[in-house]
């Protein structure tokens, strides 16, 4: 009797909190959980006359097209390597930028640079693709028409030369995303207790020592969380970057094709809902495994930094 | 004890989830009543519109005018669903799964896939009862192209399908360089013309792509120049084809026709006759022409007078000259096929409505032009124009650019300035053009869908570069090698097998 009483009491105590959480919960359920039932489409052959639920099951048949292409290896390699490069180089650039911005004493300039670095992130990929096009196109582009002749270098048609694109894509990625990521690091740095730096200075630590022994260790949890988020999206690629910026140029496939762009191109051709779902399910499952794996690894090395 | 509320709320959650899910699950059709004096059937009718999509009240007024005809004639009312080209496939899919339903719509070059999805009902026998006039009008040759596995799934739109590759050029420049267009008989005569343009106007691009990655040479395949029947493959990515009267399916990229267009494109590219970025540019061909930077493009048009519209749109003196004659195959006919959906609650009324689209002048003109006086005014018996001070983007309703999509093009009004002789030529060529020996055969690719996705991926990698000249033809052997490992031979074999079966039923 007493226990029930305490339950009711604690329930009424928590009710306001539960009510507070309700809108968020409802949103999560409707937006993130109910659509998960759609996973069944990946295992069916959709028959419009029967509807989704009554369509026939076909097992893993819808997944075959992902692996039937001889380019399956190339696009998986591209997806993983680009993401790896983006995670590692992107993180280094973002942290360096954040530390540098943190050192700007003048308030006006600090805000100014933050804004300027954030700006590219607000520009849509379609616009970015035309900016890149203005630099690279063979007929009027700045680099082939002005810079290369000035250097007396050989004429290059960038949109048919796959070798240059890993660098071009990395540069475009960094230009667009570094500012945004660095803001997250900047806010973590701002949260570090100033007195620690003061103490270090009194003990004679220089700027670099402060960064190495105070800033970086205290940034570690943020870095790890962002790293885990990125790992979960290893099998996905930024569609805008790989499809729009390359102008969907076939000649560049060997270095720019990723799983997403392959799936998009294949399904534009066939308008097949089943295969599209299969591709999504495949990417989610691999991403899920990668997150669990990375978290496990971090737990082994450094338990208090693991996400769960 | 603490766990109980969590558990309880989880059960509650499941109940909510299952309620929501069952509410949107299909398949709960109310039993169809069959009393003779029933209320008019509601027909949901989707089509592609290249014009501005009208507002709801403009749609409602047109629907009302259509209903005034359809209720007495076929006891049905109509709901219009015009969709833009980027939305069409997705919106149709949504309507097919929603409770609202969809009765009548058309394919966009994807009839076999839609049949494989069981989206269209078999109208083989219904057509005699509910759409006999349309059957007679379209004719058996064309209806066969919408027949798969012996069942008729739809009716191809009746329009100027016999399209010929044309050089669309600036008449003033042609005159300046002193070339008589009548002397241009084939695409191979163009090299010399472009050379003269380049010599006289070094800043001008002699040939611009008609679309990204297509400088128009592909259009020559589906003409009397090369007589290629794509056998249902996409226009941009032919895979396994027939050439001329030879009934052996071949890998298109091993044919002389492919080598010819690649070599020609390379020659033009190296001499600077083609836009260098032709494989990737997203600029619209009309933009190039309007800007006065380009001399010509190659594209397929029905009839011979499309240039009047192009001149009006670009503000340049445009003319065109044929590079070959039209060559009809199933692919050119069944790209736009009108069918009745399997979820339709009133299939008979839906088919009767399709019949009206092909035979009733008033219904089709309402769908295309909207309401007389408000959306258009008549000039004479055949021609219309927009009301004073209005144009296609300011009238409440128009689907004028869909004239070649919905039903029968030849009973529609024509825009001011259209020569009726050209329309007669289109209809004549529709009946009398050269035809593929496999006319009527439609390939069902569902058994080789994985090979198709792999092969098309390889094609996308090489073909835009090769056919615009920016890729060295020395790459062709690599290309063929990759096609092979992607499984192109399986597609060729599957097609040959289905073609042989089809031939044996055509005796």
Image: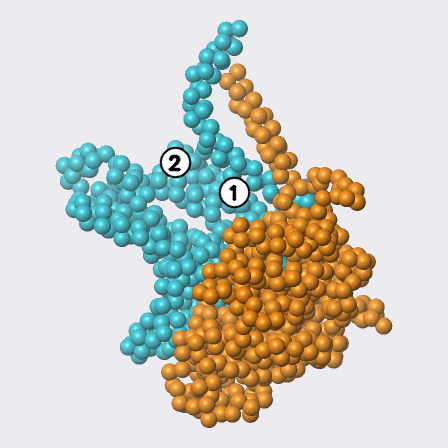
Chain colours: A cyan, B orange
Label drawn at residue B59: none
Closer mark to the observer between disc 2 and disc 1: 1
Q: Secondary structure at mark 2?
A: helix
Rendered-image quadrant of the C terminus of chain B: bottom right
Q: Residue at x 24, y 51 (%)?
A: A113
Residue A61, compared with residue A256, is above or below; it is above
Drawn side of residue B288 relative to residue B400, left or right: left
Q: Residue at x 81, y 58 (%)?
A: B129
Q: Is residue B493 visible?
A: no
- Residue A184: image location, x then y, percent: 32, 43
Q: Residue at x 23, y 34 (%)?
A: A193
The chain letter under disc 1 is: A
Residue picked out by circle 2:
A305
Label drawn at residue A288: 1
The chain letter under disc 2 is: A
Drawn side of residue B58 relative to residue A109, left or right: right
Residue extending farthest right: B507
């Amino acid at each position: 009797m007493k226990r029930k009483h305490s339950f009711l009491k604690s329930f009424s105590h928590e009710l306001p909190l539960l009510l507070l959480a309700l809108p968020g919960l409802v949103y999560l359920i409707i937006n993130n959980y109910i659509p998960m039932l759609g996973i069944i489409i990946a295992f069916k052959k959709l028959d419009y006359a029967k509807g989704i639920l009554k369509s026939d099951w076909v097992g893993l048949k819808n997944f075959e097209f992902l692996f039937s292409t001889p380019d399956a290896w190339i696009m998986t390699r591209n997806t993983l390597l680009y993401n790896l490069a983006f995670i590692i180089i992107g993180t280094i650039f973002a942290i360096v930028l954040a530390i540098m911005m943190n050192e700007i004493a003048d308030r006006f300039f600090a805000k100014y640079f933050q804004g300027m670095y954030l700006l590219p992130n607000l520009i849509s990929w379609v616009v970015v693709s035309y900016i890149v096009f203005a630099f690279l196109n063979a007929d009027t582009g700045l680099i082939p028409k002005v810079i290369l002749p000035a250097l007396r270098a050989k004429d290059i048609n960038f949109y048919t030369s796959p070798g240059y694109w890993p660098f071009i894509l990395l540069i475009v990625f960094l230009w667009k995303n570094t500012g945004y990521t660095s803001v997250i690091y900047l806010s973590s740095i701002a949260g570090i207790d100033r007195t620690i730096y003061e103490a270090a200075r009194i003990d004679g630590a220089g700027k670099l020592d402060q960064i190495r022994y105070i800033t970086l260790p205290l940034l570690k949890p943020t870095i790890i969380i962002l790293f885990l988020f990125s790992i979960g999206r290893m099998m996905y690629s930024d569609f805008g970057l790989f499809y729009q910026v390359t102008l969907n140029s076939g000649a560049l496939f060997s270095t720019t094709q990723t799983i997403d762009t392959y799936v998009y191109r294949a399904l534009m051709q066939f308008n097949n809902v089943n295969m599209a779902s299969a591709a999504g399910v495949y990417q989610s499952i691999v991403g899920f495994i990668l997150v669990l794996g990375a978290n496990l690894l971090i737990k082994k090395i450094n338990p208090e930094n693991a996400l769960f | 004890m603490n766990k109980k509320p969590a558990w309880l709320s989880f059960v509650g959650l499941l109940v909510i989830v299952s309620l929501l899910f069952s509410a949107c699950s299909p398949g709960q059709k109310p039993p169809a009543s069959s009393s003779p004096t029933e209320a008019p059937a509601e027909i949901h009718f989707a089509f592609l519109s290249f014009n501005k999509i009208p507002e709801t009240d403009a749609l409602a007024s047109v629907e009302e005018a259509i209903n005034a005809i359809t209720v007495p004639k076929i006891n049905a009312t109509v709901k219009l669903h015009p969709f833009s080209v980027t939305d069409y496939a997705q919106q149709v899919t949504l309507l097919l799964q929603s409770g609202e339903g969809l009765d009548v719509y058309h394919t966009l070059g994807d009839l076999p896939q839609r049949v494989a999805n069981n989206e269209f009902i078999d109208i083989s026998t219904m057509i005699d009862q509910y759409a006999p006039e349309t059957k007679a009008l379209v004719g058996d040759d064309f209806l066969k192209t919408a027949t798969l596995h012996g069942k008729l799934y739809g009716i191809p739109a009746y329009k100027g399908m016999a399209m010929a590759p044309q050089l669309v050029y600036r008449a003033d420049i042609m005159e300046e360089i002193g070339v008589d267009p009548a002397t241009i008989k084939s695409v191979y005569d163009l090299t010399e013309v472009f050379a003269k343009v380049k010599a006289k106007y070094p800043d001008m691009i002699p040939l611009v792509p008609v679309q990204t990655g297509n400088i128009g040479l592909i259009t020559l395949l589906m003409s009397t120049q090369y007589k290629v029947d794509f056998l249902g493959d996409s226009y941009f990515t032919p895979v396994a084809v027939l050439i001329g009267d030879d009934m052996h399916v071949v890998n298109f990229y091993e044919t002389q026709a492919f080598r010819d267009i690649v070599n020609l494109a390379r020659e033009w590219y190296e001499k600077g006759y083609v836009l260098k970025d032709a494989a990737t540019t997203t600029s619209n061909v009309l933009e190039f022409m309007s800007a006065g930077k380009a001399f010509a493009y190659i594209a397929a048009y029905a009839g011979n007078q499309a240039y009047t519209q192009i001149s009006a749109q670009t503000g340049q003196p445009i003319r065109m000259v044929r590079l070959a004659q039209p060559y009809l195959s199933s692919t050119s006919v069944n790209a736009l096929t009108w069918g009745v959906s399997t979820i339709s609650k009133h299939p008979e009324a839906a088919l009767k409505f399709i019949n009206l689209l092909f035979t009733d002048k008033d219904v089709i003109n309402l769908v295309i032009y909207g309401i007389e006086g408000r959306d258009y005014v008549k000039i004479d018996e055949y021609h219309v124009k927009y009301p004073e001070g209005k144009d296609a983007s300011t009238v409440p309703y128009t689907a004028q650019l869909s004239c070649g999509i919905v039903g029968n093009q030849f009973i529609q009004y024509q825009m001011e300035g259209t020569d009726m002789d050209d329309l007669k030529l289109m209809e004549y060529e529709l009946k009398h053009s050269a035809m593929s020996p496999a006319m009527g055969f439609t390939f069902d690719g569902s058994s080789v869908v994985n090979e198709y996705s792999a092969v098309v991926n390889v094609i996308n990698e090489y073909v835009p570069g090769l056919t615009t000249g920016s890729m060295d033809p020395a790459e062709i052997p690599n290309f063929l090698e990759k096609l092979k490992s992607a499984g192109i031979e399986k597609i060729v074999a599957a097609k040959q097998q289905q073609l042989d079966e089809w031939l044996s039923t055509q005796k």
